């Protein structure tokens, strides 16, 4: 990855399709960074910043969030510059900055934005692309652009290999290597990669990672963003102070439409489980709940972001509203109401 001058902080761009495991990898880095201090800029597609919430606890003041829309289509890079400035100030004592893109961002545009920054304290540190092994073929079929993204990465993490048989993992690694040139390609579960791979800085000559300056300076017409992945996607951000009723919510989730590819957030099931909030993740047909105790004094909210192509956003919103428990009464939930949710809870395997 790019060789920084003394005092320059490398900025690593972390990309990968919806739900591939970028936030999981970022959290792994934060836990395993040893003596290095990592700053993070998190870009959420929805207006509720679920990803930022998932890493905020780890970072305190060294995380900043760029919510609501893909960073690659920001009108100008000013906001990014402002955040880079904040993280690069000497008092923050940050060694490396990771920009976690939304799952629909265009990696090339993000790299351009980092390179365009005039901040003398930072230097572009390379592009990391996370791939979901279990969704690999389906994602490539729907979005052939993903192959191009692999071609410009410096490090490709083939994640979720725990979800595919060994032979399948080898096949996918082979396909990925076919699209990369000099990039390192590593297999991982729960984003557990050797932190050195990201913090390692190798000189790259006149090329910026796998992306040549010609690629970067190639002029795009003004409407080029129509080709961006996110142009086909819509998102719904749903928030409720009223708890959700488990049975109707599970009926909705179990029958979710094909195009509703990604759901993430936190659910308050109220009286059905007053002790825990439930982080929820759906990626394609895969659904998981992760219960964790409410922190003392934490506001009990349900906050969900749903992202999909060809989804009926107003209808989904109405369906979610109908899952709210309007007249919660003690004992209103029968004792089995959480069973539908608990089917999707697994022992934590991440770190
Ligand atoms: N089985 C398995 N699940 C994983 C792995 N890595 C991540 N996950 C799960 O996949 C889901 C999505 O992970 P995230 O890290 O939120 O993915 P993301 O790329 O940040 O998602 P977006 O920001 O929405 O694009 C979560 O439920 C994770 O726990 C893995 O290696 N194996």
Image (cartoon, helix red, strand yellow):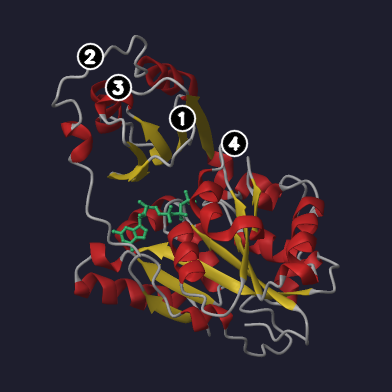
Q: Residue at x 57, y 43 (%)?
A: 45
**Which residue is label 3 attached to?**
245
Q: State yes or no: discs 3 and 2 in contact (Cβ < 8 Å).
A: no
Q: In the image, what residue occupies the spot 32% across and 64% down?
A: 160
* Mark 3 secondary-structure assignment: loop
Could you say which is closer to the camera, residue 60 or residue 266? 60
Q: Residue at x 48, y 78 (%)?
A: 195
Please state which of the two labelled residues, at mark 3 or mark 4, is closer to the viewer: 3
Mark 4 to mark 2 CA distance (whole Å): 33 Å
Q: How far apart are the alpha carbons under marks 4 and 1? A: 15 Å
Residue at the image position 57 percent from the left and 46 percent from the top: 44
What distance separates the C-alpha of mark 2 from that of mark 1? 19 Å
User: Which image quadrant is residue 341 in?
Assistant: top left
Give the residue at the far front of this rendering: 296
Q: Dot 3: few (<14), some (14–19), or many (≥20) neighbours within 10 Å?
A: many
- Disc number for residue 332: 2
From mark 3 to mark 2, how far is it between C-alphas?
Answer: 10 Å
Find the distance from the CA under tag 3 to the CA under tag 4. Answer: 24 Å
Q: Is residue 285 left or right of residue 216?
A: left
- Mark 3 and mark 1: Cα distance apart in space: 13 Å
Quarter of the image where ligand 1 sits: bottom left
Q: Is residue 308 above or below residue 22?
A: above
Q: Earlier in the sequence, mark 3 or mark 1?
A: 3
């Amino acid at each position: 990855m790019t060789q920084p001058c003394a005092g320059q902080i490398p900025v690593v761009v972390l990309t990968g399709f919806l739900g591939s495991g970028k936030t999981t990898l970022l959290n792994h880095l934060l836990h395993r960074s040893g003596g290095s201090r990592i700053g993070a800029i998190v870009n959420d597609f929805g207006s509720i910043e679920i990803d930022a919430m998932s890493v905020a606890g780890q970072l305190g003041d060294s995380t900043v969030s760029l919510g609501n829309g893909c960073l690659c289509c920001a009108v100008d890079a000013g906001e990014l510059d402002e955040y880079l400035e904040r993280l690069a100030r000497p008092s923050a004592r940050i060694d490396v900055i990771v920009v976690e893109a939304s799952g629909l961002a265009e990696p090339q545009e993000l790299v351009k934005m980092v390179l365009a920054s005039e901040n003398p304290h930072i230097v572009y540190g390379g592009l990391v692309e996370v791939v979901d092994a279990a969704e690999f073929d389906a994602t490539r079929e729907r979005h052939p652009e993903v192959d191009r993204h692999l071609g410009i990465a410096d490090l490709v993490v083939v994640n979720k290999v725990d979800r595919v048989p060994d032979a399948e993992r080898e096949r996918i690694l082979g396909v990925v290597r076919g699209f990369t040139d000099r990039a390192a390609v590593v297999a991982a579960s729960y984003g557990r990669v050797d932190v050195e791979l990201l913090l390692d800085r190798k000189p790259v000559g006149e090329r910026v990672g796998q992306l040549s300056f010609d690629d970067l300076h190639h002029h795009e017409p003004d409407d080029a963003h129509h080709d961006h992945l996110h142009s086909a996607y819509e998102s719904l951000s749903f928030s409720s102070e009223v708890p959700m009723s488990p049975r109707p919510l599970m009926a909705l989730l179990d029958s979710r439409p094909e195009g509703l590819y990604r759901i993430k957030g936190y659910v308050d099931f109220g009286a059905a489980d007053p002790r825990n909030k439930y982080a929820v993740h759906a990626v394609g047909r895969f659904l998981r709940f992760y219960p964790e105790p409410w922190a003392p004094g934490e506001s009990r909210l349900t906050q969900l972001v749903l992202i999909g192509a060809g989804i009926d956003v107003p209808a989904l919103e109405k369906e979610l509203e109908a899952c709210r428990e309007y007249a919660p009464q003690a004992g209103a939930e029968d004792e089995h109401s959480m069973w539908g949710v608990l089917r999707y809870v697994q022992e934590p395997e991440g770190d």
